[in-house]
Each structure stands twice: as structure tokens, then as C-alpha cells.
Image: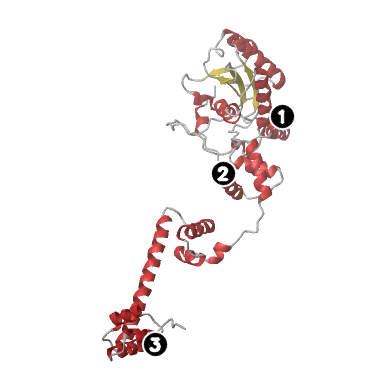
Amino acid sequence: MKRLRFTEEQIIGVLREAEAGAKTADLARKHGVSEATLYNWKAKYGGLEVSEAKRLRALEDENGRLKRLLADAMLDNAGLKDLLAKKLVTPAAKREAVAHLQALLDVSERRACRVIDADRTVIRYQSRRDDGALREKLRELAHQRRRFGYRRLHILLRREGLTINRKKTQRLYREEGLTVRRRKGRKRAVGARVPAPVSALPNQRWSLDFVHDQMITGRRSRVLNVVDDVTRECLAAVPDTSISGKRVVRELAELIAVRGKPGMIVSDNGTELTSNAVLEWCGDAKVEWHYTTPGKPTQNAFVESFNGRMRDELLNETLFTSLAHAREKITAWADDYNTDRPHSSLGYATPAAFAADLKKQGAAALRIAGGYATQPLASPAQPRNNDAEALIATG
């Protein structure tokens, strides 16, 4: 049987037999090796003593070990270069990095963990939490409310009886890829940053404005929006292909018959809103009408904000096939806006619930004061930096 390994003493002993005059072929047959092996031994160990041969073998082993260490270090550095742009802070990021190194460098899990200095127990950990139903509900709500962020979706989840932390809602919202990108307008300098005081009761001030749209047939349409500045309620959303000043007066008269006369109406200087029909109606109905400064839409910020929400959540998301279809969808959206949609300026309460609470507070104040209580002057919104409110005229 051919031997697989010879010690230095045996190799040098064979070479000495060759030096003593033995033939190479006889030595190869005797020791079970080829003649080429004997020549290689002679080239490598010829003239060496046993101690010198052992030292040579030790140096070769050490050189091989150093080469392997260098190769491992270069391989680790190559893997780390791919991870320079990634922050390996969270366990999820470390698991992703280990999987990347294993796929890229074809290394073991142990070595990949050593490269990024991660504990193998962290990499092998599998969460026992089952958020499948919660994620499904969140996706369902986000599909229904495509322009809602995680804060409003969190309020809707709580209404469904799912009591979870807001940060968890935000995390799941991001992991599911539901983030809504909003285009921000150019920031402009404003004047006073203190909101103008408003009587904190419904019907103190209404805001009017038009928002334009186009149906699938190419026919243009417009919507007359009326908003209560205190309760943020959508009092009317009237879509039509053309709305004249007389139509505006008729819609306001019908609205006043239901809700009562407002303390003030604020609008821009559009031709429909400055027509003789509107001016005559204001005098007859004794309604104070305030026009904003031309080119200053921020002075009518409440209805402008409402128009933005309507365009973002309804007009940009829906293709209207006809005027009847537009009226149906806009009416349904306005009802949902008042009764179901959380409003951030009202502490995420709905406008209808906020209005009902204000009425209860006003009735309680009147009972306590015996009918002589004055209306509280305060901003109805929660404390927040709403610069646009500072520019709304108070009349």
C-alpha cells in the first residue's frame, strides 16, 4: 500500500541511500513512491540534516497559516466594504447584513457574525409576535383611505378596538410600504404668529371658496365649499358645471334656514362672490361679508386647507363619469369628513363630534351663569403652530 506521508527523517534516510549508490528505480520500488517524487525530495531536502528539514517544514506550515489568515482578513474587508453605507444598529439590520455576507462571500453564519460583531442568538432569533391580523387591518384601512398618514390610521385602528402604541402603528405602517408622499409648497415669511381670537361656538364665521375639477369626458366642473371656521365642518359642497352669484345666494339661504345665520362670511374676490346678487342678499339678510386681500389666499386658510384635503383625498383619487356621479361621491366624502375622518387640528376628533362638544360646553356655561355668560374667546384648535390662521381677517 502506498504511503501518504513520509517524515523528514524517512525522506533524508531515502536520500542518503541514493547518495550511497542505490538506483533511483530500485529506491522508488522499495519505498512505494514514484521516481519523480524522489527527484522532488532531492531538490527540496538534498544536503539538509534532519533538524534543518524539520525547521523548513515548520516554516512552510507557518507561511501557509499566515497566508490563510491574510486571505480571511481580505475576504472580511471585502464584505465590510459592501456594508459601509448601512447602519448596523437594529437586530433586523444585523440579520440582513449577515444574510448578505453569507450570500456574497459564501461564508458560514459564525464567520459572518464575527465580521460584523453580532451575537448569533440575535441573528437566529425569530419573533413570536403574530401581527398578521393587525397588518391586514392596517392595509385594508390604508387602501380605503389612500391619502391618510399613520396618525389618522392609528385613530381608526383604535376605533376598531385595536389598542396599540402609536409607535408600533408607525413601524408597521413603514414596513408595509404605506407611506404617503406629500408635495410641500415653498415656505414664505408670514407676519404675526398668534392665531386671531375666534368665538369658540359654531356659526361664528363661515368661509367660502371654489375648487375646480374635470370629468372623464373632459367637461369642467367646480365645487362650492362652505366651511365653519370653528368646528371645521363642511357645511356644503355643491358641485356643478357653472355656479353663478344667484346660485351662491340660493345655497347660502338654504343653509341658513337649516343652521341659522352666521356672524360673518369670509371669501375671496371672485366675480361670483362680488356680484350684485351677493351684495344685495347681504344687505337684505343683514349678514356681514368680509373679502380677503387680493393675492392673499392665506387669509382664507380654513377653506383653502379644506380644498387641499378634498383634492388630495377625493378629486385626485376619483374619476367622475358624470355630474350625477360627482355629486354622489362628493356628498358621501363630505359626510365622511364631518362624521368619521379624524381632524388633526381638533385633537383627532371629528368635526361633528367637536361641534357637539362645543354646544354642550356653551349650554353648560349659560346654565351656570344664569343666562348672562359671555361666549368664550379662544382658538378652537389645539395648541399648534398654524401660521395660516394668523392671517385670517376677523372683520
The circle on residue 177 is 2
Q: Answer whether residue 106 is visible to the viewer in this image.
A: yes
Mark 2, residues whose alpha carbon is within 10 Å: few (<14), some, or many (≥20)? few
Extreme left residue here? 47
Quick one: label 2 or label 1, which is nearer the N terminus?
2
Name which residue type carries label 1: Gly
Measured Cα–Cα span from mark 3 to mark 1 = 127 Å
Vertical placement of residue 340 versus 16, above or below: above
Measured Cα–Cα span from mark 2 to mark 1 = 55 Å
Give SS at disc 2: loop
Vertical placement of residue 83 versus 138, above or below: below
The circle on residue 371 is 1
The answer to whether mark 3 and mark 2 are in CB contact below 8 A is no
The residue where tag 3 is placed is 30
Give percent across and percent down for residue 181.
52, 37
Q: Quadrant of residue 20?
A: bottom left
Q: Answer whether residue 373 is visible to the viewer in this image.
A: no
Name which residue type carries label 2: Gly
Name which residue type carries label 3: Lys
Between label 3 and label 2, give the one nearer the viewer. Answer: 3
Give percent across and percent down for residue 379.
58, 33
